[in-house]
Structures are given as structure tokens and as C-alpha cells.
């Protein structure tokens, strides 16, 4: 066929990324495109762990990866564990409802971006991980090494499998707690100690954590607010 008769390929439609990105000098939340994540160089190992700094490329400027969740329900509530530094606690959120499914889809894209970057830098990031020319085998090793955000959770004591959860860590005195009223008022963390509490969260990720040939992306909880029953306005940022 004459090349002149070939029809031009249609360019894919740009994706409408959800507005969950917090930018300090912008009013309201901005679209969050996981492909704009930027990865730095590995830090020197400290106590067996290495960190890969991450940032977000917003209009050519690298800014913190700070996102706001949609209204989601807590799985176990805010809970602490004896012996943790800084009196840190964790909170897990369910990917429920339309907003939860959209948020899950974005986190799946984040996982894909991290795995792609890991595949290109595996010798530098995970030097102890065996490298194979077999693409399928190598992909399986990479997926096994990375604790994906959207992975199913397995309970160690009995092997029961649970759906994916979005996990954040709250460090004492670095996280604030807010009511559902508008404007919100400060409240105690006890309001978030139960399961199935509808909340919104503002969290930040600073780096990938690497240790023992495994890697994970951590999120630090900065603000958590009780989500009102009727929520026409998605933004609640107190910054």
C-alpha cells in the first residue's frame, strides 16, 4: 500500500487524572499523574536500609509528593504497636465505592511506574537480587521484591487473604486530627480509633525504602479528618 494512502494514527486521548495532588502555592487540589514521579539517587545504607528520594514534577518544578485521599473507611482504625519509634501508629483505608475504585486505579498506576523504574535500576537499587534474561522470570522477581500499594494483604497467622488497603503511618506530633464541620476544628485521635470510620487524609511520600532485597513506598499521614455525610466540596486542606 502506498504510504500516502495510510491514515494517520489517532493520538490517545489524554487521561483525566483525579485531583488529589496538593501544591503549596495553588488553591485547590491539582491532577495527579503518576508518570510525573521523579526518583533520586540511592542514599548511603544506614542500618541495612537504603532510601530512594522521590518528588513530583509539577510544571517543571520538583515538589513533595503530597496527596489527599477521597472519603474512605478505616479498616481497623488508627492503631499503635508497642516499641515503635516516635509513638507511631498506622491507619489502613478501604478502596470502597466509586471514589475508592478511582483512587485504587491511580495507586495501581503508581505501582506500575515504580516497577518500571525498578526494572531499569535493579542493579543499582537491589544489587542482591538475581538478574535474569528471562523477561517473565525477571518481572516475577521484581514484583516479588516490591511491596505494591495495591497488593492483597495476607494474614500471617492463618494465611487469610484480604483486599488491598491504603496504609499510612502517623508519627506523634506530626499528624493533626480534625472534625467533619466546616470549618473543621481540632479533635483527639480517639475519634479515629474504630473501624468503618469515614475519613479524608492528607499524606506525603518522601522515598522508597529498600532493605533485604525488598522495597516499599511509604506514606506519612499529616492530616486526618472525619468526612461529613454530605460532601459536595472535595477540598479540605488546612495548609
Image (cartoon, helix red, strand yellow):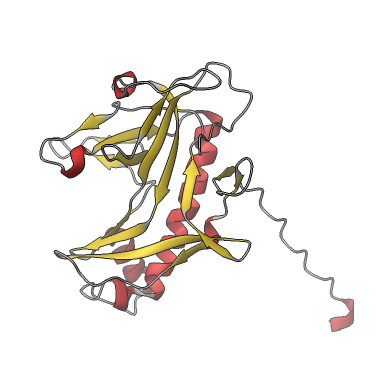
In front: 128, or 9?
A: 128
Q: Closest to the observer: 235 or 238?
A: 238
Query: In which quarter of the view is residue 39 placed?
Result: bottom left
> Residue at horizontal 23%, vertical 75%?
130
What residue appears at the point 58 percent right and 17 percent down from the top-left corner? 230
Q: Give 23 or 216, whichever is nearer the viewer.
A: 23
Total marks shown come to 0
In what quadrant of the picture does the N terminus appear? Answer: bottom right
Q: Position of residue 177 (x, y in %)?
A: 38, 27
> Please, is residue 44 above or below residue 218 in the view?
below
Name the outermost residue toward the right: 5
Residue at the far bottom: name it. 2
- Residue 114 relative to residue 87: left or right: right
Q: Position of residue 180 (x, y in %)?
A: 48, 19
Reply above or below: 115 against 236: below
Compared to residue 60, the image places residue 161 above or below, namely: above
When asked about the image quadrant of residue 19, the answer is top right
Q: Residue furthest left?
A: 83
Q: Foreground: 56 or 93?
A: 56
Q: Residue at x 54, y 46 (%)?
A: 22
Q: Residue 175: percent from the left, percent from the top? A: 35, 36
Please tell me in which quadrant of the rendered image residue 123 appears: bottom left
Left or right of 35 in this view: 148:
left
Amino acid at each position: 500500500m502506498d504510504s500516502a494512502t495510510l491514515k494517520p494514527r489517532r493520538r490517545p486521548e489524554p487521561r483525566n487524572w483525579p485531583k488529589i495532588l496538593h501544591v503549596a502555592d495553588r488553591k485547590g487540589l491539582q491532577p495527579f499523574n503518576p508518570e510525573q514521579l521523579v526518583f533520586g539517587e540511592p542514599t548511603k545504607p544506614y542500618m541495612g536500609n537504603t532510601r530512594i528520594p522521590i518528588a513530583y514534577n509539577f510544571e517543571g518544578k520538583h515538589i513533595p509528593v503530597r496527596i489527599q485521599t477521597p472519603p474512605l473507611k478505616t479498616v481497623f482504625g488508627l492503631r499503635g504497636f508497642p516499641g515503635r519509634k516516635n509513638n507511631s501508629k498506622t491507619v489502613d483505608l478501604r478502596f470502597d465505592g466509586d471514589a475508592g475504585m478511582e483512587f485504587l486505579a491511580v495507586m495501581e498506576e503508581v505501582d506500575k511506574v515504580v516497577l518500571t523504574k525498578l526494572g531499569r535500576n535493579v542493579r543499582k537499587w537491589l544489587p542482591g537480587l538475581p538478574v535474569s534474561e528471562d523477561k517473565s522470570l525477571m518481572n516475577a522477581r521484581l514484583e516479588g521484591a516490591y511491596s505494591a500499594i495495591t497488593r492483597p494483604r495476607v494474614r500471617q497467622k492463618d494465611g487469610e487473604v484480604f483486599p488491598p488497603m491504603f496504609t499510612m503511618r502517623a508519627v506523634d506530633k506530626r499528624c493533626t486530627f480534625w472534625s467533619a464541620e466546616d470549618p473543621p476544628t481540632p479533635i483527639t485521635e480517639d475519634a479515629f480509633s474504630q473501624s468503618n470510620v469515614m475519613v479524608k487524609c492528607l499524606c506525603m511520600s518522601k522515598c522508597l525504602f529498600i532493605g533485604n532485597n525488598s522495597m516499599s513506598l511509604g506514606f506519612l499521614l499529616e492530616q486526618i479528618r472525619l468526612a461529613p455525610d454530605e460532601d459536595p466540596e472535595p477540598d479540605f486542606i488546612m495548609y
